[in-house]
Image: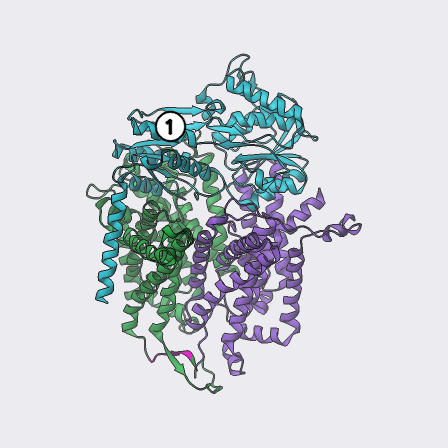
Amino acid sequence: MLEGILLTIITAATPLLFASIGELVTERSGVLNLGVEGMMAMGAVIGFAVAHSTGNIALGVVGAILAGMAMAALFGVVTLIFVANQVASGLALTLFGLGLSGLIGDAFVGVPGAGLARVSIPGLSELPVVGLLLRLDPLTYLAVAITTAVSWFLFRMRGGLILRAVGDSHVSAHALGYSVIRVRFMAVLFGGACSGLAGAYLSLVYTPQWTQAMTAGRGWIALALVVFGTWLPGRVAIGALLFGGVSILQLHAQALGVGVPSQFLSALPYLTTVIVLVIISRNRALVRANTPAALGQSFVPDR
Amino acid sequence: MRVELVRRGERSAAMAYLSPLLALLLTLIGGALIVIVWRLSTVDLSNPASGGFFGALQQGFVDYGRFLYVFFIEPLTELWSLEELVAKATPIILVAIGLSLCYLSNTWNIGAEGQIAVGAITGSFLPIFFPDWHGPFMLPAMLILGMLGGMAYAAIPALLKIRFGTNEILTSLMLVYVAQLFLDYLARGPWRNPEGHNFPDSRAFDGGQVLPTLFDTNIRISLIFVFIAAFAAWFLMRWTKMGFQIKVLGQAPRAGAFAGFSQNRMVLMTFLISGALAGLAGICEVAGPVGQLRTSVSPGYGFTAIIVAFLGRLNPIGAIFAGFLLALSYLGGEGAQIALGMSDQTTRVFQGMLLFFVLACDSFIFYRLQIVRTPTLQTGTVTS
Amino acid sequence: MKKILATATAIVALAVGIGSANAADKLKACWMYVGPHNDGGYSEGHDVGRQMVQKELGDKVETSYVESIAEGPDAERALERLARSGCEIIFSTSFGFMDPTIKVAAKFPKVKFEHATGFKTAPNVGTYNARFYEGRYIAGQIAAKQSKSGVAGYIVSFPIPEVVMGINSFMLGAQSINPDFKLKIVWVNSWFDPAKEADAAKALFDQGADIITQHTDSPAPLQIAQERGLHGFGQAHNMYDFAPKAQYTAIIDTWGPYYVKRVNAVLDGTWKAEQIWDGLKDGILHMADYTNLPDDVVASAKDTQAKIEAGTLHPFKGPIFKQDGTEVIGEGKTLDDGTLLSMNWYVKGIDDKLPQ
């Protein structure tokens, strides 16, 4: 039973991890994209549509990535080139993405999709605890790989240093000769690709089907997780597991019959997020060290 | 050769007026694309009866003409739908006015939807526990309680930000879910109407517990609250020291800090004001068109108001116009469903596009496009 | 520019003209849904019914619908819009539309309204509902026969009488086979959230349930059952395609024949407001093919279904006891419809605590 619960928690955490790692990179470059929910919805619908039409799940995943990137590019043009307010543009992106995905997905509602099979290594996968980690679905491994790669990129590679410099002070980065807009655009696109993956995970793995607004607010949770993890990939992953854990355990608490009104239990993940956000933000040194100082500020090169 | 954005010497007054029109025009073009693609996707192009690609294209244009009529004009042609337009716009504008002040000061209250729910709850306390009270003070007391509830709930993210530096976008948003679930619990549980066959509604408010209507129409006196709030917000921004502080802190936080303005005070004040207006909108819905406390009192007014605040350029008077435009798009969306069988998602797509284009076009107020023929030299001058 | 404007105006005029010409001699029947018309669950069930009306009555009717209408003022406005656009009969399909329907019906005495699952009526407002609990009783019996652990999981949306009635009926059915049967209940506070429903299904299976049933609308729980090699029941729709190895049967909402009958009544002038609560025997709901079951279980399920249809078996026939042991109704008597429609207590044997 414990293994089952762990497996469920990991599955619940994976789409959150995808989306929040992407947003982390975007925010590290100094751009706040609140449109994660909209990009996820587009990823989910295009991923499902492509997988269903071609019968190839891998193609579906690629389609979802491209859809997320296309949405992100739209956001990038409006906020980076036309220097529009990032908060408002992000909200517009969410609205637009949810609406458009609903229109596109009209033909795919009520169609069963083929799920992605779990990895299974005979012998090893049956081992206790360790075995559990050897029988997840391929996309979960991808999420872990991306998280590790992002961590490595940000803190071990020159490109990561430039990205963080752009996010901390675009004026200085520009003065040093880096193209702020280009770096930010790439970061926004990466965020879009990850959100698209998160959407694909929902419509291809989690529940192999497409329905309107199936993201159900997970994009917003992903945004919270970035702050929650103080812009550090490892902590974001822990946050995703914690949030997934609370959401799953409240269902278990209900099934055990604890007798607390279900609305209060359903509110637990959100309350936990608020409380943890408060606890983390109390540690100002940690937050200040990692918060991109130029987050949400538009940049227009002066010449 | 490339195109670059260059800061204008001063803001362009012409663009300030042209930009919303330009945005609307672009939205109409984008809308045409969507409707025509939708039409093409519904027609079997290989069937000669459909007239082939061009026949479908032509049909697409005709559909778009009908769509525009049904969406933007028809709701304005009849008295009843004008009344409905006002009823729909009222809560959205009330909330948007408060949010405008917030966003002007660079404070981000995204949780108005939750403050609406709490305002509805606290405002409904009296009529649910004292159903027989109908005196002249009942309704004012309900409205004040509703505002206080919205204020108190908005104070949570504000205080967390001031005290701990917690990101207010996220806390205010998380608290929306909490408030909605709590409202759901009350309406299904303890505050349920004991004579309602266990349906999840409170008792129906009556007599002095309901907002009176104006001139024999469906329009309630909450419309007057909209104008009072808009005027007060305009006055605050135009003529008071606090309005000045909001603007300075919003545009140049460091300059504001040097001038001795307290960022923290401003965060709290703008959150309290926007929370109070959201709470007022909540109780006005409950004591108005809804007439009882239900499991949900707002179909997303708190989020729509964010769009309205930006469409109205964070100006209280602008919020009124933008609020009516958005309300029109909801009514029009329902009309398009009935008349054309279009998905209700069309409305959302339109709203998203409109906001996108307004935001993009607004940058032409302060910037202009310039075509650069040779790569520019990096000058290395740093200005901040 | 002027030319474009003129062309545009001409197109609009033409289009509007076409629109109104079509509608002239047909009966206009309209529907209002609380969710998207293709939600794969409750609202789609009604839309399938609407399509059946369009198909069966062909040229005699024109149907339209509005979808995703929030309960409250929006519902009132949408109903008024429908009434004003020439709809002669309007089906408002969610219980939360009850008060708006009554209000708007008073303004349009000539328009006929039918409200699903409510209890308020007027001279031009009828109500209709299906006795879904009949299907749930059969499902409960199947669960008790098939379960090895003797525990079923129940995923539920919101504590309203309709849902509570379903839980009790399922449990009474199960207890008629196995008096010690256990039920684990999870509320997801949503009618439709596939991922959350999937999580709830996993939690219930992890806690020892080996059969799942639901009063939420997505096929996600059945997909999980299939993944785990366990079983469950479809809700509102035949969900067989989503989980061909997991679905035992499904309780399918079949509004179509009812809608055809009522629209026909308007056409021939015999419509009057009625309170209709039909069951299996009337065809307003039916059971999907029994699959993945041994023959004897199928036979007994069919037998129970036949008895319910014949009226010789009523799921809520006494004696019935509440959780605390108080008797609700004695031997030989049956709960009346009023009590059923306002049910807010669990029968004895359910461990969960009902939110009050």
Position of residue B170 measured from the top left corner of the image (x, y, whole percent): 50, 57
Is residue A292 left or right of B41 when viewed as pictured?
right
Position of residue A21 measured from the top left corner of the image (x, y, whole percent): 59, 62
**Residue placed farthest to the front in the image?**
B48
Tell me what hue chain A is rendered in: purple
The green one among the chains is B
Position of residue B168 measured from the top left corner of the image (x, y, whole percent): 48, 58
Q: Is residue A164 magenta?
A: no
**Residue placed farthest to the left in the image?**
B215
Q: Is residue C230 above or below residue A282?
A: above
Tell me what hue chain C is rendered in: cyan
The magenta segment is: B3-9
* Mark 1, residue position: C261
Q: Residue at x 54, y 63 (%)?
A: A66
Q: Residue at x 31, y 48 (%)?
A: B331
Characterize the magenta stretch by its predominant secondary structure. Answer: strand
Viewer can see residue A147: yes
